Image: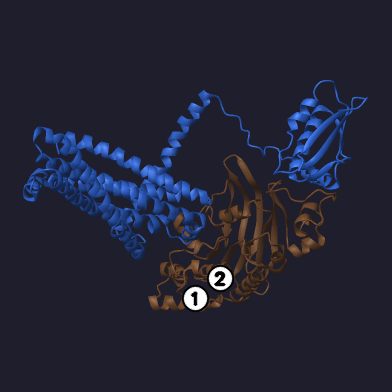
Chain colours: A blue, B brown
Amino acid sequence: MSSAQLTVARGADGGVVVRLAGPWLLRAARPRPEELEAQLEGPRVPRLSFDTAALAGWDSALVAFLARVLRTCEERGIAAERGGLPEGVRRLLALAEAVPERAGARAEAPAPPWLARIGLAASGFGGALAAPLAFLGETTLAFGRLAALRARFPLRDFLLYVQQCSAQALPIVTLIGFLIGLILAFMGAVQLLRFGATIYVADLVTLAMVREMGAVMTAVVMAGRTGAAFAAQLGTMKVTEEIDALRTLGIPPIEFLVLPRVLALVLMMPLLCLYADFWGIVGGVVVAAGMLDLTMTQYLNETFAAATLTDLSLGVGKSVVFGALVGVAACYQGMRTGASASAVGDSATAAVVNGIVLIIVMDGIFAVLSHVLGI
Amino acid sequence: MQPPASPPAEAHIVVRDLTMAFGDFVLMRDLDFTVRRGSVFVIMGGSGCGKSVLLRHMLGLLEPARGEVLYNGRSFTRAGPAERDAMLRGIGILYQHNALWSSMTLAENVALPLQEYTKLSPAEIREVAALKLALVGLRGFEDFTPSQISGGMQKRAALARAMALDPEVLFFDEPSSGLDPVTARRLDDLMLEVRADLGTTLVVVSHDLASILAIADDSILLDIEAHAAIASGSPRDLLAHCEDPRVRLFLTRGAEGRPQGGARPGGSA
């Protein structure tokens, strides 16, 4: 099959005849409008007409080509005669030109100068901070009302969230806790073996798990697992107007939706943290038994000697705070979801990212505080 | 609920000089209309002209830039949160996307307002919820969740929930969206029946012309380009007498009202 062809002939009066031949179809190769436009440069062309006698077929490809060419002709003051075009093409072109482009429909807002952008970003920062703080404040007030037994609290939903944040999270927390313990023990063993101080692997694993890794890793897992789920649930409820339906019924969504979720995370996180600590220590035992000449008794004695109740409390206390952070970040992102399906995805992503960032930042603050307080 | 007063002329809802704006962008200016008690009032307009936004203003989900909304002569806009909650008790809303709480069964959806605002025992609540569902033709579906039933049934279940507290006013946001013509017609009949039996005032946001002409006593037509209401009155009267080409364009589905000649009507998206 021959391909689409474009030939340009110049008449005696300077008028141009454009001959279109072959199949002008979207799925075949075609000449670009630029080729024709280049030929229209130079001496002024008063008139342009089309000859489509040899045209073997056309679809939107030809119409798009012609629309572009006709626009160019209009800009350059060339009179284009459409008489030579097929009837269908003429009608489609007329349809495309029937409604004028709406002013401002195209996105072309000019970017402000860089100094103005810095200023806008700085002044926007205050506003961006105000919304999450307001949400935090409302949630805190709702907790106050719950404590005073004046909040509307959906007990059955709460128990469901407790199940989601505890029993259903056990497999992944087991895996992560065990592997973290294993990795810590392995890294420690490789170094300590050189000094013949392998018994201190137990100290290393225990302290790291109990003070730090148990709480942080559990919180990260829960941010990815439950935080994303909470944000998506609330985001979908926002999109389908379920949250509006609560609000117009006079039920504060914070009490009805946010409170049980955050509370479930806050209550279950310390339990998960202890559980992760346990599996981390098991991971350490596996390395000690497999790689090092340590007996189980030696290892466990050292473990119990290494960690004090203070260390354990610090880790568990941190996990309570992390649970609150993950829950509030997730619910905040869910509640501020826009009005589309993709906005729900954005909220879930933002919930996980914000949750993890908050965990790490807060862990840093805890590290400094515990150092200053000598814990 | 008492039957409708014989000449239903009493003002139930008054919207006074309402201006709706998002930041600097003014969507609608100086809206002024009255909804009579026991009437079916339709807010008409093309897609995206701010019908639903007006509804959200009337429900306090959005705050007006200027003006106010009054229910029974009391300002809703200027009321404090507690007073607003009390006024919202008299209002039922059928949302565009139904907004049934997806984690609950239909009976629980209808029961939640009853649990919140009545002193009925759980057994009584269950009975009332079953009755409301039966009224909209959903007898036996009490323990289904919203995802287990069809769109038309969801719409009716949402209506049952909106009617749970026997409201004085029912708001409908695009009730026929997503329904086939026959189901939409049945919903219209159901709405008129509710009005006839309970004397409820109905405020309907719609661009479904067949439905509008079938149910409306009164209406306003919003126009996006004018940023204002361009007509008010009974849609049937407007269709018969109004000369404004923009009104004719809407009420005749574009057959009249614009100079002919290949130009397509509409263009407001």
Eyeballing the image, is B196 above or below A168? below
- Above or below, B243 against B216 in this view is above
- Determine the secondary structure under disc 2: helix
Identity, as a three-letter code, of the amino acid under mark 2: Met
Q: Dot 1 lies on which element?
A: loop
- Say which amino acid is labelled 1: Phe
Q: Residue at x 65, y 47 (%)?
A: B29
Pointer 1 chain: B
Picture quadrant of residue B150? bottom right
Kindly tell me whether residue B121 is visible in this rendering: no
Q: Which residue lies furthest to the front in this view?
A: A1
For the N terminus of chain B, give its image quadrant: bottom right
Q: The numbered mark 2 sits on a residue in which chain? A: B
Q: Can residue A214 be seen in this view?
A: yes
Residue at 76% in and 58% down: B253
For residue A102, above or below residue B230: above
Front residue of this view, candidates A66 and A287 = A287
Residue at figure coordinates x 47%, y 57% from the top left = A237
Q: How many marks?
A: 2
Tell me: B81 left or right of A358.
Answer: right
Q: Which of B135 and A299 is in front in this view?
A: A299
Q: In the rendered structure, are the residues bearing label 1 and label 2 in contact, judged by CB atoms less than 8 Å apart? A: yes
What residue does disc 2 label? B153
Q: Residue furthest right?
A: A12
- Residue B141: x %, y % from top left: 49, 75
Mark 1 is surrounded, within 10 Å at the Cα level, by few (under 14), some (14 to 19) or many (20 or more) other residues, namely some
**Residue for badge 1:** B141
Residue A144, numbered circle: none
Residue A271 in the image: x percent, y percent? 23, 54
